[in-house]
Amino acid sequence: MYTLTDGITTLSTSFISRFARDLPLSIILFILGSFLLSINLTHTVYADGLFEEQLSASLGNRKADLLIKMSPPVVTTETIKNQSQKPIIQFRLFDSIMNKSFDHVTYFITIEKEGKRLLTNWFHDHAGDLRIQMNPRNTSQIVVYGEQDPILNAYTGTPQSPVVAAGPIFLEGGLYHFIVQIATVDYDRTLIPDNQQPVYDGYLSVGNTQNYVILRDSKEVPIKIISYYDQLKNITYDQKSNELKFLMPFDWNTGRIKNVNIFVHEEVSVPKPSSFSAQNYSGKVNGIPAGKMLMIDPSNSTKDVIHFMIPKNELISIAEKINSNAQASTGITDFALKPEIGAPAEETMTTNMSTMESFSKNSTTGLKTLTN
C-alpha cells in the first residue's frame, strides 16, 4: 500500500491494478507525478506543470482558485499526428473551500510558446467552467469558433459544444504558457476594476516525441524518447560505453526553481530483447547519479519504458550542485541512460517499489528529495 499522508488519498496495489486494466503503467506514472505536483499548488499563482494546475488568488475576501486542466492527460506530438487528438483545455474558477464554481466568469486568456504569442482572446462561461477544444492544424494562425456575447464580445460555449481554437497549437512539444486574467464574476456586465483583476500564470506540457536509432553490433535498435518538459537536443549514443545521452534546455536558477511548482519527466522506450535492453538501468542527470529518480516499467513484453521523474526538491538539489561548479550557465540538462547488463530482475522491482513509496510518503511536503 502507498499512502499519501494527511488524508489526501490512498494508493493501494488493488487501486493500481484496477487502473492497469485500462491504462499502461507509463501513463499511470505520468498522472501520479502530475497529481503529486498539484498537491502543493494552492499557495501561488505561478507554476510550471504537466497536464493540470490549480492556482490560487483572491477576489476581495474570497479565495479564488483556477483549475487549468488538459484532457486527455497525455498529449504528445505523436498522438496529435497519429491519432488526430483534439485536446480540451478546461478553465474553472472556483472557491476551493466550498468547491463551488463562480458564476458569470469572463476570462482573458493568452497562450504562449517560448515567448511567442499563439492566442489571446476573451471568453465567457455563465457557470464559470470554460472549455476550449484545441484543433491542431498547420496553418498560419489560430482561429476561434463559437458564439460571441454581443456586449462582452467574448466567446462562449457549453461542455457539450465547447469553444474551438483551430490552428498551429500543440504541434510542437514542450511547455505552453497560459496567462489568465479574470474580468467578471457573479454578474455578466459588472467588470472588476483593472487593478483588482486576478491574473493566473501557469504551464501545461505537450510531450515531444523523438525517434533515434542506436547501431550496436551491426544491429539497429529503435529508441523512442518523449520529453514532457521541453524539446530535446543532440541525442547521441556512445557505443564504447553503451550509453544513450540527450540534452534539454533548462533554467537552473535556484531561486526560480524554488518559486515555482515544477516536475521534469522524460520517457525512454527500449525494445526488448535488444542490445540496449536489460533487467536494470542506470542514469545520470548532469553527471549526478539518478538513483530513485529513475523508474522502470517492465510490464510490456516487447519494450522497457524507463522514466526520469525529477520532483522539485531533487531539481533544487541538482541546481545547488551544478551552480557551485558553474555548469548552470549552460542552461542545459544532460541526461545519460545505460543498461546494466546482467543485473538481477529483483533489483529492478526493488528500485521501482521504493521510488513509488518515497513519492507517496513525501507528497505533502512538496515532494521531498529522494535518497538512494
Image (cartoon, rainbow, N blue to C red):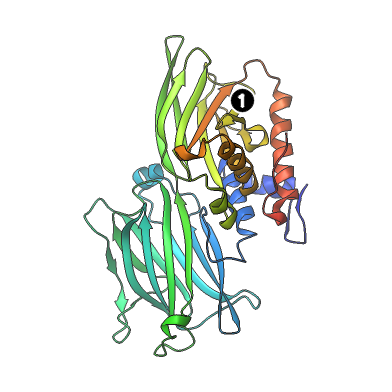
Quadrant in which the C terminus is drawn: top right
Residue 23 in the image: above or below residue 93: above
The answer, for residue 161, to whether it is visible in the render is: no
Which residue occupies 57% across, 37% down? 322
Q: Is residue 316 left or right of residue 207?
A: right
Quarter of image, res 21? top right
Picture coordinates of residue 20 (x, y %)? 62, 44
Helix, strand or loop under label 1: strand
Q: Is residue 129 left or right of residue 40?
A: left
Which residue occupies 53% across, 47% down? 253
Picture coordinates of residue 299 (x, y %)? 61, 33
In the rendered picture of this protein, how many numbered marks are placed on residues?
A: 1
Picture coordinates of residue 213 (x, y %)? 41, 23
Give the residue at mark 1. 281
Residue 179 in the image: above or below residue 60: above
The answer, for residue 306, to whether it is visible in the render is: yes
Q: As drawn, which residue projects farthest toward the top?
A: 217
Q: Residues within 10 Å of mark 1 (few under 14, many from 20)?
A: many
Q: Is residue 240 left or right of residue 43?
A: left
Residue 360 in the image: above or below residue 134: above
Picture coordinates of residue 370 (x, y %)? 70, 41
Which residue occupies 45% across, 89% down? 187
Quarter of image, res 318? top right
Q: Is residue 57 left or right of residue 153?
A: right
Label 1 is placed on what type of residue?
Tyr
In front of the other: 117 or 215: 117
